[in-house]
Amino acid sequence: MHDHSALLEKMRSHAPDEERILALAGLFKVFGDPTRVRILYALSESEMCVCAIGEYLGMDQSAVSHQLKVLKQNRLVKNRREGKTIYYSLADRHVQGIITQGYEHVTEDAEDEAVK
Amino acid sequence: MHDHSALLEKMRSHAPDEERILALAGLFKVFGDPTRVRILYALSESEMCVCAIGEYLGMDQSAVSHQLKVLKQNRLVKNRREGKTIYYSLADRHVQGIITQGYEHVTEDAEDEAVK
DNA sequence: CGTTCATATGAATGACTGTTCATATTATAT
DNA sequence: ATATAATATGAACAGTCATTCATATGAACG
């Protein structure tokens, strides 16, 4: 193997916080599932209760609940109770921003592809 | 189950393209792994050859190669050959942007936490 | 050509994760 | 209190995926 000591020393001098790396990957991981993205996208349109989400996405109530739990644990959604039903919505504008930026990125990639 | 027909009809009238949803989740999924984030973060500092990345991150050459393949397939990195060694770098500014935004988001979350 | 170095690839494995099924919780209404 | 509706939870299963090991490619140099 050839020598890298100079580069490596430079790199390590301002290496990112490992904790932040994990948090960053963890955040993206949550966005990395189609079901969760669908849910978030739906909630970006309107507040919804669990069974409406399930009905809208054509999926099991239990599956929706499980995913909402993941989203809540990561503070991407919040909820409020109204009688028996619980309404979910996006936690803050950050979430909306990430979705939007990602969506634009994907759209631009599609355009790049079309140019070729 | 209570009635949602009004809401559902409204939602479905401007539902997002399923293909885009999958692409979006797929993109985030790639960013959802600590190893890949570390690699991308490293490459955002400097172009690097495979074995330098491996040495820097303390991981197997083969593992690095496998992950670089994933990153390349998703057009997040590009490479150039120079003799026997192959140098990798970020594919475009988009990648840098996503990392930066995510990093800021994570940092802000940490601050929010500190306030409580 | 054959050897060596840098990288890539394929198969195997172990860990993780999304879904389903069954069941539990919580709140309303009769 | 009991029944019912909305949601949550736990266990189990199936599929996915990152890593490792062994091996293959591909380039340079004697």
Image (cartoon, coloured by chain):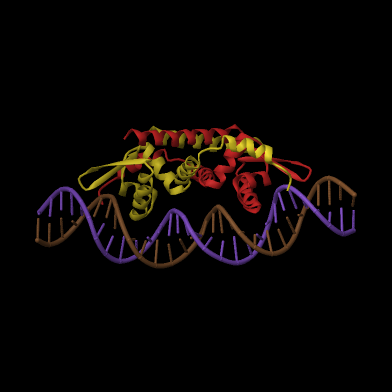
Chain colours: A yellow, B red, C purple, D brown
What residue sits 38% from the left and 50% below the top? A67
Q: Which of C4 and A106 is in front in this view?
A: C4
* Rendering coords of residue C6 (x, y %): 73, 47
Please state, as top left, top right, bottom left or bottom right, where the C terminus of chain A lies in the image. top right
Asked whether, in this view, residue B74 is left or right of residue B28, the answer is right
Above or below, comparing residue B66 to residue A105 in the picture: below
What residue sits 29% from the left and 42% below the top? A79
Q: Nearer the viewer, residue A15 or C8?
A: A15
What residue sits 45% from the left and 40% below the top? B16
Asked whether, in this view, residue B47 is left or right of residue D2, the answer is right
Q: Nearer the viewer, residue A18 or D6?
A: A18
* Rendering coords of residue C3 (x, y %): 83, 57
* Rendering coords of residue D24 (x, y %): 75, 59
Which picture quadrant has residue A44?
Answer: top left
Using the rendered image of the protein, determine whether residue B91 is visible from the camera's viewpoint: no
Asked whether, in this view, residue A90 is left or right of residue A115, the answer is left
